[in-house]
Amino acid sequence: MISDDYLKYPLRRYGMDHDRYDWSILPRRQKVAWPGGARIALWVVPALQWFPLDQKGQPFKPIGALQTAYPDLRHYTLRDYGNRVGIYRIMKALDRHGIRASVPVNAAVAARYPSLIKECAARGWEIVGHGLDMDHLHYEGMADEKSLISKSLEILRKTSKVRGWLSPAKSESRSTLDLLAAEGIDYVCDWVNDDMPYAMRAGGKTIHSMPHSADVDDATILIGMHHDEDELRDQLIDHFDVLYQESATQGGRIMPIPLHSWVIGQPYRIGTLETVLAHIMKHPGVWPATGSDILDAYVSGRKAAQARGE
Amino acid sequence: MKRDPGLYDYLPYAKRPKIEWPNGARLAFWVAPNIEFYELDPPKNPTRGSWPRPAPDVLGYSYRDYGNRTGFWRMMEAMDRCGVRGSVSLNVAVCEHHPEIIKACAERGWEFYSHGTYNTRYMFNMSEEQERALIQDSIDTIKKHTGQRLDGWLSPALSYTERTLDLVAEMGLTYICDLFHDDQPGPVKVKKGRLTSVPYSLEMNDFIVYNVNLVSPRHYRDILKHQFDRLYAEGAESGTVMCIPLHPYLIGQPYRIKAFEEALRYIAGHDKVWLATGREIAKHFNDNYYDAFARASLPVGEAP
């Protein structure tokens, strides 16, 4: 039996059942204008991750986690392949089109492979905070999240400015956003409820959610869904085509391409990314941009609209 | 616990009274978007937790919230372009949280039926009184916000007690979507009232297709077409039903909507297809075939 409280709904009200952000309908918002009249902001987000060998798996294992009994050399090295080899294939694919990526970096990767971070910076890529490593998830009740965030950002900020954040496995505690905003983070990539940025309340500050899809992601489609590379290609192209069409009447849209260097960076898979980028880049009005570029254009557009009294 | 739910008798597909849909249609086609609200911090039901990850499940919650902010509107426009109305499987608290969605559906002449209050409040372990309160909430909320009488039921998150369907019928609802034993409507054996099972389909349900069977969007398009082709052909002998149950947070994703719309346009483009709502199908069956189907049904033997 259950208590009658189970049929009480104190948060049954207009809008959301929390105060983190406001209820808002995508097609009824003010249209967003991208620089140069672009229709689509292309946001390529290849993550650089490190899965430590002594994995604890708390409070759960993320996608890509080690699988076998200790020492799981097989999965450890297969993931680290992305940092040694895969990412350099992604760089070539993006360089061909002059696309600057926004690269979520585990602080452990920056500490272990500083030359890799220099390569990213040399391309004008944006470094995005991505926690300490893939075995330090953020979750409610964890010990000292504040220090974990400070430590992760401190390591990354030795190499570059950091304005964005993607929590490992998109896992947050109830405090994560407040702590990130206090550390000067402007945008977070964990929430997948929108195709456009939107403002969130974070301990008296504003942090923006950026639409980092959990769906059109190489690991989700190839590993989670067990689809093949041709299906990945079709899904990314269909995603772009629909957004491109919408942008004709509904204002600027964002095409996110979240990647994992250990997934798409394999020789047999990288061609899929090249095909998709060639399809996207042949369209007029595509603006390859970093997360910060997109956020700044979005926020300044909103401010200008407010100034006009809209 | 029962070994047999005892909700229907045996009626072989090959030997049934012939169903004729309005205007000589072979197939009654309906689309049932599940418009849902999943709470960030729901109270716990001892039988089932709400989220796979520890609270707050940011990924799970925001994934579903996408449906209301974003996916619903894209899905609705695709349905508009194909001239297809929805029969909304509604978590009725959406009437309070997101009245704009309710208004958009109502303006299009869509039907609303109940899918419980929230998709994070399960009927497992409820007392009869609690179940009645939950069903009455749906009747009252849908009446208040849409003016519609509540006719249909799909239990929230497919959660039940042994008495749920009896209570739904007793409280005046006329059809349910909870049983998956048939491609035609059929009588449901309840204690009081007259209840029809309208085929809803988990096989065609985008949640099952995408999240359980891990199907790609273009393959889902082909699945829908193949399902339709066969039911349409069989419908020349006796009317069949095809339902596409949807979730805006899944189907409303840009990478999925295009292929889905191709399937929807294909189906709606055939003649002899009755573009109906759940209530309309239930009523036509109830008025014309319920008794004949009940009479033709064969008693089920005792399980050894």
Image (cartoon, rainbow, N blue to C red):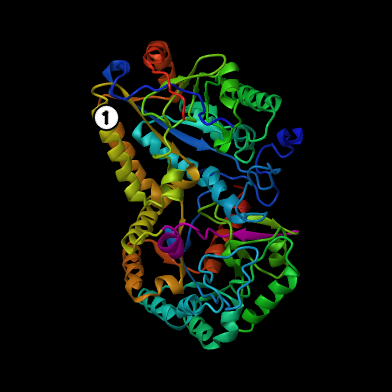
Nearer to the camera, B30 or B203? B203
The front one of B268 and B136 is B136
Asked if residue A234 can be seen in this view, the reply is yes
Q: Tell whether A205 sits left or right of B291.
A: right
Is residue A74 shown above or below B22?
Answer: below
To which quarter of the image does residue A170 belong?
Answer: bottom right
- Dot 1: what SS? helix
Image location (x, y in percent) of residue B53: 62, 56
Figure quadrant of the N terminus of chain A: top right
Q: In the rendering, at what x and y percent does residue A204 appear?
A: 75, 59
Q: Determine the residue located farthest toward the bottom in the rendered image.
A: A115
Residue at point 70% right, 65% down? Answer: A181
Q: Magenta residues, as a range? A: A204-225
Residue type pointed to by label 1: Tyr
Please give the name of the residue rendered at 41% of the width and 14% of the height, measured from the top-left corner.
B294
The quadrant in which residue A297 appears is: bottom right
Q: Position of residue B68 (x, y in %)?
A: 54, 42
Q: Which residue lies furthest to the front in this view?
A: B304
Q: Which of A57 and A297 is in front in this view?
A: A57
Q: Reply yes or no: does residue A207 show up in magenta.
A: yes
Q: Is residue A67 above or below residue B178?
A: below
Crowd tier of the residue under label 1, counting other residues whose Cα lies within 10 Å: few below 14, some 14–19, many 20 or above: many
Verify whether residue A31 appears in magenta: no
- Residue A124's place in the image compared with B166, above or below, is below
Q: Mark 1 lies on which chain?
A: B
Residue B146 appears in which quarter of the rendering?
top right
Instruction: Give residue B203's position: percent from left, percent from top.
Output: 39, 40
Q: Mark 1 points at which residue?
A: B232
Is A181 positioned to the left or the right of B275 in the image?
right
Who's the residue at 53% across and 58% down the image?
Answer: A211
In the image: residue A185, left or right of residue A192: right
